[in-house]
Amino acid sequence: MSKLGNWLEQRFPVASFLSKNLKEYYVHSSVNFWYAMGAIAFVMLAVQVISGIFLLMYYVPTTEQAFSSIQYMMREVSYGWLIRYLHVVGASFFFIAIYLHMFRALLYGSYKNPREFLWMSGVVIYILMIAIAYTGYVLPWGQMSYWATRVIVSFLTVVPYVGDGLAQWLQGDFVVSSVTLSRFFAFHIVAFPLVIFLFIGIHIVALHVVGSNNPEGVTVNAHKKPAKNLRKKVIPFYPYVISKDLFVVFVALALFLGVVFYAPTFYGFFLEHINQIPANPMVTPSHIHPVWYLSPFYAILRAVPDKLLGVIFMFLSLVILFFLPWLDKSPVKSMRYKGRLSKGSLCVFILSVIMLGYYGMVPATDTHLFWTRIFTVLYFGHFVLMPIYTRIETCKQPPELN
Amino acid sequence: MQTTTRIKLALLCLASIVAADGLEAYIRLPKVSIDTSNVEKVSEGAAFFKERCFTCHSMKYLRFDDVSLNAGINPKDAPKWSADSWKGHPPPDLSLVATTRGVDWLYGYLKGYYYEKGSYDNIMWQNTAMPNPYPDLQGKQKLIMTPEQIRAFHPRFYQVVKLDASGSISAHAFNDKIDALLHYLVYASDPSVEERHSLGPMVLIFMITLSLFAFLLYRDFYRDFD
């Protein structure tokens, strides 16, 4: 090591820190491409932060100018359209990566002992992402921005006794107005990002304490150099796993940029056509719905006939994720070794999330509501019945590390 | 299925049809394809916009757009309306109309004026506040299906209206004008298309090459375990 390196190392041991957390961080060789989704999410976060900084230079957070400042930026600032589309498509890709990341955790039991805290910190990140995505959606001040804010603020009014006061406190006015826009702007660019950075830090520290899970569900000591006979089964993160992550991240970025350059609104899914109309408090859109990544929760809200209960169930559908590590009583981690009931239930759960996503975006006709209710029951059924079906099913014997 | 159930179902279908408002939901529109890289067509559309639309409609987000400025569409000269002009329906700004309405709908709307009982109405938007901007060019169209027939048969657009008296230019020439206008409206709603599509291939080739090298690197490292 060079003299300067030595000098720095004694005062700020960055080299040994990196070495300890990359070169001497061991994972099982069965980790596959599902394990690169976190890396994709991390890169998408960077894309959001960088494009967000540039957006901030031109965006004006007032009801009079928010909409037009974005239009002028897209048309008159050099590559302004690129910055805006990167941020818009980036939000959707962030959620795609996180949904795949969460699916991986469900598939391989990455939430199970000893990773309960890791899983819970991830759920907090997910909830923060929803908050960031929603407050960001308000900023362009289009029709759906405005009316979605009206709907979401109205959730607070269902709280008994203090509901109306809470709603006024949040929106800072008697109606959704310029004041509301300014504070959602502050939440979106400062408050929530700071908290999400904190929790991403916690998530990564927690990961490095307990080590990465793997599809085989075998326990690996992440910080101990494997014995000679295990050198092909337990591999260091650097340079092996990171090279795989890098490849997957580049492919994901290629897809991402393909969408940015050739279908930035993604047929109205990533950037809704109706939100290209400036907010108009006098005209209610015929049908209000959230962007695709929040659609399942909106479907659950609408499925319940009572407004208060609807809001409660919508929040429960998120909160229940925190209890997942204790609902799963299975002796094995990975779906590879779990029984038929767990596999079937996971399939039904994924189907119900997709179908709820669909029903959250279409108008609530009687037929749609009927199916939304069925899938809401199936969504919760996956979790509520989990202690039963994971106990009674027969699992295969997972391999030992040897 | 029992007869009563059938009747109930039929009634339900009928009720849902009658409940829906507007005829446009029952008309099958042609899929319009627009290629905004066709600069001539876009400019032609801009000229037509200046001639027939700009008297009432603004294009406020196109402040420094050469195509618009060359055609004389300058936001400085745009008509200004107050919120209560036109009986509370001032002509909207059209910068983003191609995104918000969709080009198929616009095609139907722009060609959808028909003459009935001494005045014009639009098949895609009954009782629209906008007067027919080009009866002299298009001539008179008439409705050849009753609203009940439209609801029952889900006809194609061209089955609904028919040219009754031709205008000052041929139907073909008029079609061309509408096509050009649609080109301009689509262009105006997202002028980044040209830049995106010229930059896109280079970006993607770069990313794919990068991915390829990353793949080779990954394969090379994992060869240690073969």
Image (cartoon, rainbow, N blue to C red):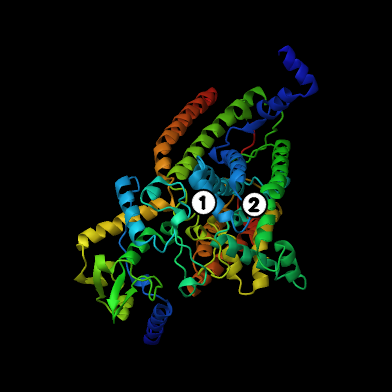
Name which quarter of the figure residue A372 lies in: bottom right
Chain designation of label 1: A
Q: Nearer the viewer, residue A400 or B225?
A: B225
Q: Residue at 60% of width from left, 26% of height from top?
A: A239
Q: CA distance from mark 2 to mark 1?
A: 22 Å
The residue pinned by badge 2 equals A132
Quadrant of the snapshot with the C terminus of chain A: top right
Left or right of B25? Residue A88 is: right
Q: Nearer the viewer, residue B111 or B221?
A: B111
Left or right of B127? Residue B168 is: left
**Is residue B59 among what the camera can see?**
no
Marks 2, 1: nearer the viewer: 1
User: Compared to A262, does A298 lie above or below?
Assistant: below
Q: Nearer the viewer, residue B200 or A195?
A: B200
The residue pinned by badge 1 equals A71
Identify the disc placed on residue A190: none
Q: Are marks 2 and 1 on the same chain?
A: yes
Quadrant of the snapshot with the N terminus of chain A: top right
Q: Residue at 76% of width from left, 20% of height from top?
A: A9
* 2 or 1: tag closer to the N-terminus: 1
Image coordinates for residue B130, horizontal then vertical, percent: 39, 70
**Is residue A76 among what the camera can see?**
yes
Image coordinates for residue A14, horizontal then vertical, percent: 73, 25
Please, what is the three-letter code of the amino acid marked with disc 1?
Answer: Gln
